Image (spheres, rainbow, N blue to C red):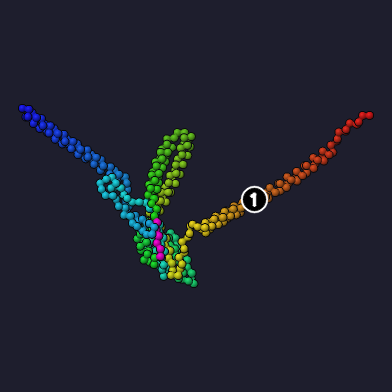
Amino acid sequence: MRGSRTAALSIVTLTGTAMLLAGCSGGGDESMSAVSDSAVGGTRDLSGSVPEAAGDTALVGTGGVVKDGSSKPTGDGLLADIPGERDVIATAEMTLRSQDVGATVDAIELIATSAGGFVSGRDVNSNPDDPKGTRAVIVVRVPTTKLDSVISRAQDEGDVVRITADEQDVTQTVVDVDSRVASARASVERIRSLLSEATTIGEVVRIESELSRREADLESLLAQQRSLADQTSLATLSVTVLAPNAVEPPPEETTGFLPGLQRGWDALVGVVVVALTTIGVLLPFLVVLALILGPIAAAWRRRQQRTHPANGSAADDAPREREPEPVG
């Protein structure tokens, strides 16, 4: 009997344990399923609030051009739907040597315009007596995403002497300015709603003053936003084209005694020029003041000279008191 009771108790215990484990497993699956659904929902919301990448971004670094494919991290996490595009201000400089400087400059302009860019500057320095010493500089603005292809095509227009490139990542600055613009717009709208509810002249004056200040802040932020958008959407490429006998200008030194002396001399010349300009501006006013105040000062001095001698003679003509005669 005791053995049968023990066996029955063991069976009941094992059955209960199995049922408990099954319940825990089901609950865990439901919990994980809920967490997974929550994560998927967060991904959808996040991807909806973040704009998709506009495309590959051409990034340039010192000594060459590299391309960032804006690759996104793989996986099912939240970061999988966040675009990896960066906002970059790209600039590049190139020096070419060509037999026909004018034709090379025209070809580079055609390359830039065909890529959706434009020419922002052109400087041709030629000497009719020495055509092979011609030197030209052309500056073009092209879409940042096409900068590398423009450089590659421009290299075929002459012998490459030097290529340098640089990039400045301003992604955080762009995000910050965009956020501040959104906040400033919301602030302006709130002030305008308060202005519509104002009932007294004092309230209207105070609210309009605050509205003007916040609108000025918003305009300043919008100007920064437009400037950043222009610099990040369009890269700057400066191409120097040299004829066979043209000499490339040496790189400008920025440190050392001579550069420091040159900057000091330039500063001194600037101060002297400003001082002379100020004197030239004030000189007509000083001449007019002298013509007006000169006669007034002369008349005042003559009056003072006439007044003081008259006072002295009057004092001399005044009767003097007799001194008492001595007695006996």
Which residue lies under the disc numbered 1? 286
- Residue plotted at (92% across, 29% down): 327
User: Which three-letter amino acid code belongs to the residue tagged 1?
Assistant: Leu
> From the viewer's perspective, is residue 60 above or below residue 196?
below
User: Quadrant of residue 132 in the image?
Assistant: bottom left
* Numbered-mark total: 1
In the drawing, does residue 230 fall left or right of residue 46?
A: right
Q: Position of residue 187 (x, y in %)?
A: 41, 40
Return the residue nearer the eye: 264 or 103.
264
In the drawing, does residue 324 fall left or right of residue 94?
A: right
Quarter of the image where the C terminus is located = top right
For label 1, the crowd category at 10 Å Cα-Cα, with few meaning under 14, some 14 to 19 and many 20 or more, is few
* Outermost residue toward the top in this view: 1
> From the viewer's perspective, is residue 125 above or below residue 185?
below
Q: Does the magenta-highlighted stretch encompass residue 165?
A: yes
Q: Position of residue 34 (x, y in %)?
A: 23, 39
User: Quadrant of residue 321 in the image?
Assistant: top right
Q: Position of residue 238 (x, y in %)?
A: 42, 60
Is residue 106 visible to the viewer in this orientation of the structure?
no
- Residue plotted at (64% across, 50% down): 286
Q: Does the magenta-highlighted stretch encompass residue 172?
A: no
Quarter of the image where the N terminus is located = top left
- Residue plotted at (68% across, 50% down): 291
Q: Please report the bounds of the magenta region as a residue range.
A: 161-166
Q: Position of residue 231 (x, y in %)?
A: 40, 53
> From the viewer's perspective, is residue 271 above or below residue 322?
below
* Outermost residue toward the bottom in this view: 129
Is residue 195 visible to the viewer in this orientation of the structure?
yes
- Residue plotted at (42% across, 47% down): 222
Q: Secondary structure at mark 1?
A: helix
